Image: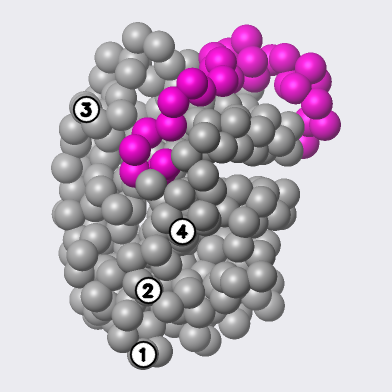
Amino acid sequence: MAATLAASSPELTRGWFQNQLTEVNEPFRKLLEKYSGITSCEVVEHVNQIREEGFKANPYPCIGLYRFTNLTLVTHPLYATIVARLKRPDTTYLDIGCCFGQDLRQLVCDGVPSEHLVGLDIEAPLIELGYALFRDRKTLRSQFLIADVFKGASQETWAALQRRGVDVLHCSAFFHLFPLEQQLEAARELVALVKVGGVIVGRQSGSVKPGNLPAMQDNLHSYRHDVITLVDLWHEVGRITDTRWNVEGTLDMVGVNACNSAVEDENSRRLLFTITRIA
């Protein structure tokens, strides 16, 4: 990880970093004001400060382009159903690649008991900055785990999750980081966590022309899906894990800005999905 923004100059020149915000979108502002008690006049400066620190720790587009301020789970068609489900006793939510834990905090703000919620990331600094962003270290009862999806149950934290079982697994902006073969590997590990009847929901970068695109790391590629190839992926996941999944998805233009993005092109779309374990 780069220690300073200057050391991250390759990422800056690739369009992964934008100028500081002068306004914060209304849903994120509302969350910071209502949940965290941050005053309206503090919000913009506070978000900019956390972004600067976050990009030093993890120089990725989701940080540098302020995408963490776009609450993704709350826009999912099943959000109200998810909230109601997670309010029940003995239910568990897991956010893979939780970043600052912003979607998790929105669930708490909407009445879900925080002890039902688990955030997981490979980057400890982002979880620490999440506490700074939302000012809730002393009040939030959620669990945050540092783990690598690809190492699965070889990690005790993952094995404990597997024993607990997950009802709702939120997985946004994760699969599209990897080649198709690694997406299959990751899905095999996630399968072991999800209860029968549980759901995997999220969004990621998709494409009307599915295939390989240059990845964020030089000389590597990642695979972008349409709905058909996503269904095919999970059919293969089911075959090799002896499980069954129902896959629903849509492609749209929400949040896509191909003219001003280093990671999107004219074929890019948002892929919104719901993947339900049926056996």
User: In what element is the residue under mark 1?
Assistant: loop
- Residue 217, relative to residue 93: is it above or below? above
N-terminal label among 4 and 1? 4
Give whichever of 184, 104 is nearer the camera: 104
Tag 4 or tag 2, which sits nearer the N-term? 4
Mark 4 and mark 1: Cα distance apart in space:
23 Å
* Amino acid type of the residue tagged 2 in the rendering: Val
User: Which residue is the site of mark 3?
Assistant: 253
Amino acid under disc 1: Pro
Q: How far apart are marks 2 and 4 (CA)?
A: 13 Å
- Is label 3 or label 4 in front? 4
For label 3, the SS is loop
Q: In the rendering, at what x and y percent does residue 107 appear?
A: 38, 64
Q: Which amino acid does label 3 sit on?
A: Met
The answer to whether the residue labelled 3 contacts the one labelled 4, judged by CB atoms less than 8 Å apart, is: no
Q: Where's residue 259, x and y in %? A: 35, 9
- Location of mark 1 (residue): 89
Magenta-highlighted residues: 1-29
**x 72%, y 49%: residue:** 125
Tell me which numbered mark, 3 or 2, is placed earlier along the sequence. Answer: 2
Q: Which of marks 2 and 1 is nearer the N terminus?
A: 1
State the residue at coordinates (39%, 63%).
Answer: 109
Q: Quick one: quadrant of the C terminus?
A: bottom left
Which scheme is used to colour this image of the protein? one colour
Amino acid at pointer 4: Tyr
Marking on residue 35: 4
